[in-house]
Image (cartoon, rainbow, N blue to C red):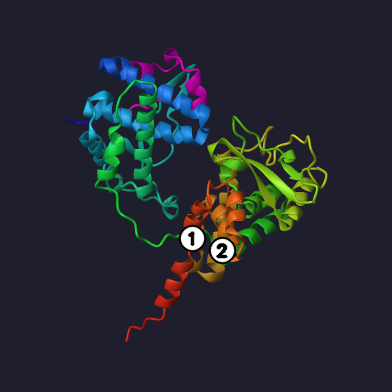
Amino acid sequence: MAIPHPVPLYPTYSELNDLSFNDYPDLNAFLQDGDSWWMQHWLWGQEFLSYTGRNKSEHTYTRFRNETERFLLWMFLVKGVPMERLRKADILEYADFCWQPPVDWICLANYEKFQFNNGRFIANTAWAPFKLKVPKNLENTNSEPDKRKYKPSQQTLTATFTGIIAFYKYLMNEEHLYGNPAQIAKRDCRHFIKDAQVKEVRRLTEAQWQYVFDVALTMADEDPIYERSLFVISALKTLFLRISELSERPQWSPIMSHFWQDTDGNWWLKIFGKGRKLRDITVPDSFIPFLKRYRAYRGMSPFPSAGENQPIVEKIRGQGGMTSRQLTRVVQQVFDRAYEEMRQAEGEDHAYKLKEASSHWLRHTGASMEVERGRALKDLSEDLGHSSMATTDTIYVHTESKVRAKSGKQRDVK
């Protein structure tokens, strides 16, 4: 028997809080047509996700929404068993399902779950619960990726268990359920691989970064509209920012007065980061000329002052700050041009990483360069917003691997 095509279950966080089933006819019909326990489980999911969005972050809400939605859809359309009856073996069966989902449960792009049409939110038929990530170097080709080759990464599999374990924990705390089989099942999931690999930080080499910086600088010199691009590129790399930390969010707007100077003349930037935590990042002297240059382009005084409420990165059109998606496009435009210039000058072998790089690589690039110049790990950890130095050490410090690689190069074939 064919598995039915899934329907999206939850909208964005802002829409979830005011959701009325009258506005979501497809969702309402789907739940009403199902078994009697479907609606109760959907409401449990709504409770859990509202709690997550309220007490964590919108990013965490989106991650947990995807995992909760997939898990519920599997129960509704595949397993046909409510959560209180699931055991460890069932969760492992779900992991197998996630390892190789049906082809029509896989899409190739990030689609909106619901589309607004004639005053109602209609389920987007192009959406699917799983996404096959298309390599960036194949995005502009005409070849259609084979969905049958979908396989989740170890990180994706970990996120799957993290999401459903958190869902069970919430329901246990609210006394809806008594037991968490997902917590037990994770240890026995056959798809997890014990990883003894050399960890590679997704970063740019110094040469690749130089091309990115030089391209951003040239673009700004040729046309002032790209002053924004130069500032964003410089800030993400030099201040180790996540793209979300520079973007406009419902609970936080990065504004110019978040740059501040202490009594010793040191500059800092106040950031609202992961885990809804505020931190202050050191702003090096080398970044100040780019801050001044960007402010001059916007008709501002050289330095920010207390009370300035202008967004740090303003929208291209309209008022307010840029979203993460808009900032990502700004960065990608620079990466694309840097890739072309480096490829033509030095060849594909040296430039190819720029083709796959994302905005987050700039944070990793800046942090890795700081480790290499010998900066104290404690200071770097606090600027990065890590909860402990151990996290920074795990991600960025690879001294032993470098020594091993250097000695390994001395082997001879003959």
Q: Disc 1 vs disc 2: Cβ atoms closer than 8 Å? A: yes
- Position of residue 120 measured from the top left corner of the image (x, y, whole percent): 46, 17
> Which image quarter holds the N terminus?
top left
Q: How many marks?
A: 2
In the image, what residue type sits under mark 1? Answer: Lys
- Position of residue 360 measured from the top left corner of the image (x, y, whole percent): 53, 50
> Which image quarter holds the C terminus?
bottom left
Q: Is residue 36 above or below residue 309?
A: above
Residue 9 highlighted magenta (yes or no): yes
Q: Which residues are magenta?
A: 5-29
Residue furthest out toward the bottom: 414
Q: The residue tagged with tag 1: helix, strand or loop?
A: helix
Question: Which residue corresponds to the image point at 24% horizontal and 39% vertical from the top-left?
Answer: 92
Residue at image mark 1:
353
Residue at image mark 2:
208
- Position of residue 379 measured from the top left corner of the image (x, y, whole percent): 62, 54
Residue furthest out toward the right: 301
Q: The residue tagged with tag 2: helix, strand or loop?
A: helix
Question: Which residue corresponds to the image point at 53% horizontal and 49% vertical from the top-left?
Answer: 388
Front in this rendered view, residue 146 or 91? 91
